[in-house]
Amino acid sequence: MNSLAEENYLKALLNLSNDKGEVNVNELSKRLEIKMPTVTSMMKRLSAKKLVHYESYKPLRLTEKGKKEAAAIIRKHRLTEMFLVEKMGFGWEQVHDIAEQIEHIQSPEFFAKMDELLGFPKLDPHGSPIPDKNGKMVWKEYSKLSECKAGDTIKLSAVINTSAEFLKFLNSRELSLGLKLKIKSVEPFDNTMVVSYGKRLSETLSHTVCERLLVEKV
Amino acid sequence: MNSLAEENYLKALLNLSNDKGEVNVNELSKRLEIKMPTVTSMMKRLSAKKLVHYESYKPLRLTEKGKKEAAAIIRKHRLTEMFLVEKMGFGWEQVHDIAEQIEHIQSPEFFAKMDELLGFPKLDPHGSPIPDKNGKMVWKEYSKLSECKAGDTIKLSAVINTSAEFLKFLNSRELSLGLKLKIKSVEPFDNTMVVSYGKRLSETLSHTVCERLLVEKV
DNA sequence: ATAATAAGTTAGATTAGACTAACAAATTTA
DNA sequence: TAAATTTGTTAGTCTAATCTAACTTATTAT
Ligand SMILES: [Mn+2]
Ligand SMILES: [Mn+2]
Ligand SMILES: [Mn+2]
Ligand SMILES: [Mn+2]
């Protein structure tokens, strides 16, 4: 069994892995807000447990075992977020911090029950995929809203940033997942977008916001 | 904020407190399955935090602050058990171990939501009172089934032992809280009771079982 | 190419929470 | 009351998880 601290490192490693599956000590240190020497020593521990490939001065990589255990924790996190929103009535901006704790509960029955009550969901409330029981997790092919062009009609499918502040901003504009919107224009100077959706016929969204929204073309 | 370990000590102290509010180091050690020297050193820590009155060789007593914090954890434990049974479909024999972990979640909103969804329950699935937000917890005046006499008609109201084994035994006899039963006879030799309830007209219950069942006279 | 900066490691300290061994105090039994 | 037993404390060790200070390696800028 891995400790709570070990679980948080594993999860962060999987979340930070680039296309090569590599993570730098420094990135991990910043993400977890834990100093680099502490991270180095934990990496040696996880390496001894065959969860991480560690060589001095080289980027970190999860082993297959490490990936699987990390995915299991992310699965618990995202199932929990979905449960909190769908079955307990929380807003999508409220659930991350609670899930951050509940993801460490050791009880396969508890999460199996959540999964069942939710009807075996594939996505969490922020549009991120929920890994299956084997640790398999596939992202659909989304584009960033910021990469779309004037005239495109798209469906809002996921958010990249899941901070409460950003989600509250989206709430204030009635932007939610599944929403269809039309891009009316793109300001060439600062890449600001003017979009219309629902009853809102002309909303202006900054480039910063558009970069954090994942969409599907419709 | 108290650590998970500290919370478990506080909870055990409140659960073990006798009428005088006293607990011995030895009892606490046995309950938590932690050796006595470790308990002593933790008591010094909790004493420094003004949660426990500690003097060498004297029984332990929670301070008012300690009682309040212990009750808050027990409240979270029992609300969780109720939620797991009522809203997630678990059996009363499955919920204790999960609640033992969830009671440490730091999120007033999470437990407030449970409380609300459950309609502000006063009792947990084992018949134990759920402390209110101020830490007040009152036991109704129950008797042990073992103290009742032949001819009494009583209502099963709470269980003293909440081990999965005992609860599974009760399940196997279709014994559940709220059930009315009639005491047909008491064997003087070993205090075994013969009772009737529902479709079961003659069930024999050992003294050991009867001592662990709390009932109300009807 | 060298110097400056950033990233990563080593060494050593600290705190929480557990343990065992040895001893002391309190309680029970003879 | 004296001995035996139980209960509780002290002292010292260990591991997990964190930190700072100092040093080394790698990368970037001049
Ligand atoms: Mn999240
Ligand atoms: Mn976490
Ligand atoms: Mn319980
Ligand atoms: Mn607990």
Image: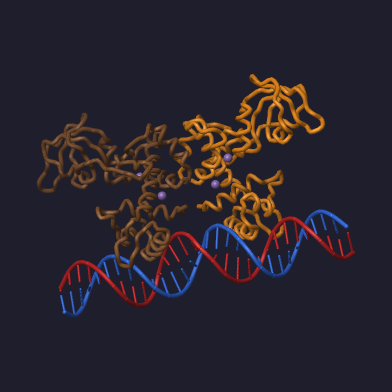
Chain colours: A orange, B brown, C red, D blue
Q: Is residue A106 placed above or below D16 in the rendered structure?
A: above
Seen from the viewer's position, the closer of residues B151 and B188 is B151
Q: Is residue A215 placed above or below B80 in the rendered structure?
A: above
Q: Is residue C27 placed above or below A136 in the rendered structure?
A: below
Q: Residue B109: image x %, image y %?
A: 47, 39
Q: Quadrant of the C terminus of chain B?
A: top left
Residue furthest to the left in view is B188
Q: Residue A129: image x %, image y %?
A: 60, 35
Q: Residue A79: image x %, image y %?
A: 53, 37
Q: Is residue B175 left or right of residue B74?
A: left
Q: Is residue A156 left or right of residue C22?
A: right
The image quadrant that residue B210 belongs to is top left
Seen from the viewer's position, the closer of residues A102 and B202 is A102
Residue at 58% from the left image edge and 38% from the top image edge: A131
Give the tally of numbered discs.
0
Q: Residue D7: image x %, image y %?
A: 29, 65
Residue at 36% from the left image edge and 47% from the top image edge: B71
Residue at 65% from the left image edge and 38% from the top image edge: A161
